[in-house]
Amino acid sequence: MDISGVLVSLGSASLVYAIWRMVRIVLRPYFSGSLRYVPGPPCASFIYGNVKDLLTGDSSTMHEELVEKYGHVITYKGFFNMDRVYTTDLKAVNHFLTHSSDYQKPAQARFFLSKMLGEGLLFAEGEVHRKQRRVLNPAFGPGQIRELTSIFVQQAHELRNFWDAQLSALGEPARVNALDGLSKTTLNIIGLAGFNYTFDALNPNKTNELSDAFTTIFSNTERESFIWPILVALLPPLGLIPNENLKRLEDAKAVMRRIGMQLVAEKKASVLEASAAEKMGSVESKDLHGRDLLTLLIKANMASDLPENIRLSDEDVLWQVPTFLVAGHETTSSATAWCLYALTQAPEVQRKLREELFGLPTDLPTMDELNSLPYLEAVVRETLRLHAPVAQSGKQAMKDDIVPLSKAFTDTRGEVHDTLKIDKGTHLFLPLLVLNRSKAIWGEDAREFKPERWYSLPGTVSDIPGVWANLLTFSGGPRSCIGYRSTLVEMKALLFTLVRSFEFELAVPPEEIARQQRVVQRPMVKSEMEKGTQMPLIIRRHQRT
Ligand code: HEM
């Protein structure tokens, strides 16, 4: 057979495979039994299923309405008629979280992650994930976060000076986009704390190759970017077709790779140098090792007592650089922006918090001092409960399963089930934000911002399987957020400095604030959607009397 014959045969085989997969996917919900009679809304569109509203509206409100109408175990259609399970049943959620190898990231999410960030901790699954997590865990321990606190405080001062300069230039009070300043600050922080890398993002005259690559990845917001990975995950040969969006991602990833490799090589060399000097007794190892997460990770990975089969390759270490950048940057800035928003809507809370912060007689608090402030703790908890930046987490069943339920549900034929049968391949969303603000769990005032609730919580919250504070904000189980301890201290350091320095008001009516529906929920202004994400605040300097 000549080459054109081979190509025609390959093309025909791919086409038959594609048609077979498509037919299976489209017809499966009608024939395969498990979810057929689980309650839920009718399919709204073949391509988008019921999820178009999820991309444009408030996903948590939409899910809350579905649960109210159809019950605590429901199913609705995702892209291309695919079933998606949604349940607020705590026993089921706990089951999904603790069986993380059976409920992995969906194939299309992994495809996208691999194109954007390579194969770091967010991407890894199964044994590879366990291995990476084991080596990374020590770098995120409480002792390390204590070391990083001075970076958080110093960068909070930089942002205070930046806004102070804006007030001098614009006159007081002034409208600022708080999200922009916070986003640049958390990028500076993860640069320094993560890799001892200087972004200097608040400096308008400075360009930075790594942050440009990062911006390219996150400006990739076209609707196509949702559909394409799904199509490729369903029909892998489509991945071979050139695609402008993917090309931009790959170029940006190449920059991340080059800079990441350079950082890994430099840090490895300095760890080796420090360890050699230490052996000669001339230099204390702590003087040379640095305190950034990447150095700690490299140290842990080079430890002589680490079993060889656990040790990560340089490639595995490298991909943690963009992973930390992505996971630790917009999440923390959005959470802090939502906190300032909440404080504008509760002036008495803002005043009371400021009073407590001034009780600490220093501008440069340590981690222990920040953690000694109970109202600050309550404000941070309440913000992360009500404004969890990651509203839901998508998973896909790797095998058929019987999921335990704390409460039975009735199917559309009137049959009662005390377990939920799930087929291999089924998609589901873990309801992180919805459970954080469930009235059944938190009480009738669950949708209100009330830091005082943390002084006396209802007993029902203890069943929530979150890694921190009975919340699902940082998820739970083996795939919970590795960086949550660092985020908490970082948010406290930012709030400590900013709330002591400025008074905040919302610059638009509160009903104008919307949430952008992406992985991280960032604020937008409904009548200014063209400006992208923002949190417009009126700020004035606080005069201490
Ligand atoms: C307010 C701030 C943050 C929030 C709300 C947050 C939330 C989350 C959530 C919900 C997950 C689970 C995702 C899923 O399974 O679908 C996660 C995972 C992760 N987070 Fe965070 N995160 C925050 C800050 C950070 C920081 C500061 C870092 C690192 C410097 C970080 C690193 C990670 C990593 C590496 C994972 C993957 C863990 C794994 O799969 O083993 N996060 N985060």
Image: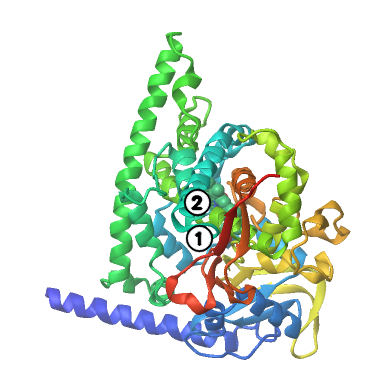
* Relative height, residue 544 to residue 150 (above, below): below
Q: Quadrant of the N terminus?
A: bottom left
- Locate residue 59, reporting x and y percent: 61, 75
- The residue located at (58%, 80%) in the rendering is 83
* Relative height, residue 273 to residue 163 (above, below): above
- Locate residue 401, reporting x and y percent: 66, 68
Asked if the residue under mark 1 is in contact with the one under mark 2, i.e. CB atoms within 8 Å, the reply is yes
Q: Nearer the viewer, residue 494 or 308?
A: 494
* Relative height, residue 513 to residue 164 (above, below): below
- Locate residue 474, reporting x and y percent: 64, 55
- Locate residue 483, reporting x and y percent: 58, 46
**Under tag 1, what secondary structure?**
strand
Q: Residue furthest top?
A: 281
User: Marks 2 and 1, Cα distance to the nearest angstrom?
Assistant: 8 Å
**Under tag 2, what secondary structure?**
helix
Task: Report the amino acid beneath label 2.
Answer: Trp
Of marks 2 and 1, which one's residue comes earlier in the chain?
2
Residue 123 visible in the displayed image: no
Q: Which residue is mark 1?
A: 176
Left or right: where 94 falls relative to 218: right
- The residue located at (47%, 65%) in the rendering is 109
- The residue located at (45%, 45%) in the rendering is 188
Residue 413 visible in the displayed image: yes
The total of numbered circles placed on residues is: 2
Q: Hey, which quadrant is residue 426 in on the image?
A: bottom right
Q: Quadrant of the C terminus?
A: top right
Left or right: where 473 falls relative to 180: right
Q: Which residue is mark 2?
A: 163
Q: Nearer the viewer, residue 67 or 484?
A: 484
Q: Hey, which quadrant is residue 263 in on the image?
A: top left
Q: Nearer the viewer, residue 253 or 418?
A: 253
Task: Report the amino acid beneath label 1.
Answer: Val
